[in-house]
Image (tube, helix red, strand yellow):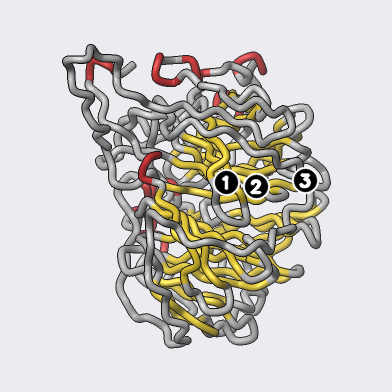
């Protein structure tokens, strides 16, 4: 892949590609009512701790071990949909609105009868959460109970987070046509073997990220798109705070104050701060810094289209932002990866911001080094030395995401014919690369020193794999969290 792509062609392609992180949900959480197990370390601050327990094979879902070949699979893949791409292409910073905080605490989870959380766990020390299951309406003995009809074949698992011995996962639960009938769902699993602990229905739709900081669980939500594919500044999206003991979730910071829906969210655990990319409109995505203790919001002034990923490096307390701004009238550009620390912004690349045209798509930092996957929406390449604007990238599928697991770098090629690869950070090559078990691998986190959980967005699957060769250890079926069909008369 050419390292320098004509800037106008690069920018013109913004409107053509759609990433797979969109999706809209509404209404009620589904899933069996599960009593939460005692997990005292659920919210330990040391999120790198991972259980080394042995993992049993799933009795309900199996697959053959994947190949440990290091040969790169050369397949065309595309994981985007018209609505999902809007999550990746936005720009322009503006000041967040500061409305009354009373709107933020509004708990919308009681908006319909189907959204009522059912608390069944009795242990106060457990990972508390509410399983809002959708059960058929009570019928007479002469009536046959109808089976659940799902509105999609996948619940759209969008993000994973680890805290202590608990794995947190958020499901967007959109319909197959990307319409909204359900709110998002937070599920908690035992980290070592994937045992489902409990679920909590979210207050809003289309969750984009789940993070743990300061002993609290936060879920960022983009919410539903309007008729113009915007994410309005209202009380139907924002950043939720989960109450694990009450098994509820409610808005902590609403989009009314932020200025729009949240498409990415990372946390600085040491200073109890959050950073969110806020979608004002197409070509306009700001970065908001949030004090998680007080709810105070500050919009960082240096970013106009921060749709190229966020990453916070705990080892150096540095925020990395991928900006992709292009002024259509003047031709001015602000494209590249930028490091933000202690109020100071510096460009990672040695190229001038108006000369750097490698558009960031996914960023992961390991031991103070940012690794960047770039995409022009036709081709894609991984840069292990993004700081050198003349360095060579390694070609991969144009729609790929990076993951950092136990200090090692992994790359997920998304789409129907997806792969997962372990990356040699010296030259960007694949140490091994194997065919993924499902469509569109979306996130990857450590389960132990030798295993990792993989989230699949396009397949109802949560998978445990070996990080030594990519082989499958265990598959968990997540179909029960799919959106269900809802009659028009039942909708809000």
Q: Name the residue under label 3.
A: 44
Q: Which mark is residue 189?
A: 1
Say what secondary structure mark 1 lies in: strand
Mark 3 to mark 2 CA distance (whole Å): 10 Å
Seen at 69% across and 29% down, the residue is 123
Q: Where is residue 176 in the image (x, y as percent from the top left)?
A: 26, 42
Mark 1 to mark 3 CA distance (whole Å): 15 Å
Seen at 75% across and 48% down, the residue is 268
Give the label, 1 or 3, closer to the camera. 1
Seen at 39% across and 19% down, the residue is 114
- Residue density around tag 1, few if under 14, some if 14–19, many if 20 or more, within 10 Å: many
* Quarter of the image that includes the C terminus: top left
Say what secondary structure mark 3 lies in: loop
Pointer 3 or 2: first along the chain? 3
Q: Name the residue under label 2.
A: 166
Which one is in front, 253 or 448? 448
């Amino acid at each position: 892949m050419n390292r320098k792509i004509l800037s106008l062609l690069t920018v013109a392609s913004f409107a053509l590609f759609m990433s797979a992180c969109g999706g809209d949900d509404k209404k009620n959480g589904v899933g069996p009512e599960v009593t939460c197990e005692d997990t005292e370390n659920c919210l330990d601050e040391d999120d790198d701790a991972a259980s080394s327990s042995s993992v049993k094979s799933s009795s309900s879902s199996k697959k053959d071990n994947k190949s440990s070949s290091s040969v790169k699979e050369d397949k065309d893949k595309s994981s985007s949909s018209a609505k999902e791409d809007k999550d990746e292409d936005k720009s322009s910073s503006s000041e967040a609105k500061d409305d009354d905080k009373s709107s933020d605490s509004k708990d919308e989870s009681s908006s319909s009868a189907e959204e009522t959380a059912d608390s069944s766990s009795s242990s106060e020390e457990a990972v508390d959460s509410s399983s809002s299951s959708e059960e058929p309406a009570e019928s007479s003995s002469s009536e046959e109970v109808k089976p659940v009809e799902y509105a999609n074949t996948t619940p759209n698992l969008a993000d994973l987070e680890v805290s202590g011995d608990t794995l947190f996962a958020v499901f967007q639960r959109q319909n197959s046509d990307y319409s909204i009938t359900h709110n998002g769902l937070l599920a908690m699993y035992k980290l070592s073997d994937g045992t489902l602990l409990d679920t909590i229905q979210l207050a809003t739709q289309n969750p984009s990220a789940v993070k743990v900081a300061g002993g609290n669980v936060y879920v960022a939500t983009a919410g539903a798109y309007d008729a113009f594919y915007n994410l309005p500044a209202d009380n139907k999206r924002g950043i939720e705070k989960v109450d694990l003991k009450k098994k509820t979730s409610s808005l902590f910071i609403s989009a009314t104050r932020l200025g729009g829906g949240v498409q990415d969210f990372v946390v600085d655990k040491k200073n109890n701060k959050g950073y969110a990319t806020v979608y004002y409109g197409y070509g306009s995505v700001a970065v908001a810094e949030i004090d998680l203790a007080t709810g105070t919001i500050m919009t960082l002034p240096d970013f106009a289209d921060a749709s190229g990923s966020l990453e916070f490096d705990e080892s150096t307390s540095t925020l990395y932002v991928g900006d992709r701004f292009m002024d259509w009238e003047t031709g001015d550009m602000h494209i590249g990866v930028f490091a933000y620390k202690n109020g100071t912004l510096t460009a990672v690349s040695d190229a001038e911001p108006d000369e750097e045209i490698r558009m960031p798509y996914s960023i992961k930092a390991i031991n103070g080094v940012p690794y960047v996957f770039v995409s022009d929406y036709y081709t894609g390449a991984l840069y292990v030395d993004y700081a050198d604007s003349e360095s060579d990238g390694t070609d991969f599928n144009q729609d790929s995401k990076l993951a950092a697991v136990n200090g090692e770098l992994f790359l997920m090629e998304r789409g129907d014919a997806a792969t997962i690869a372990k990356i040699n950070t010296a030259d960007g090559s694949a140490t091994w690369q194997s065919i993924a078990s499902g469509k569109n691998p979306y996130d990857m986190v450590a389960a132990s020193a030798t295993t990792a959980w993989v989230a699949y967005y396009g397949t109802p699957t949560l998978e445990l794999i070996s990080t030594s060769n990519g082989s499958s250890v265990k598959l968990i079926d997540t179909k029960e969290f799919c959106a269900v069909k809802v009659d028009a008369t039942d909708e809000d």
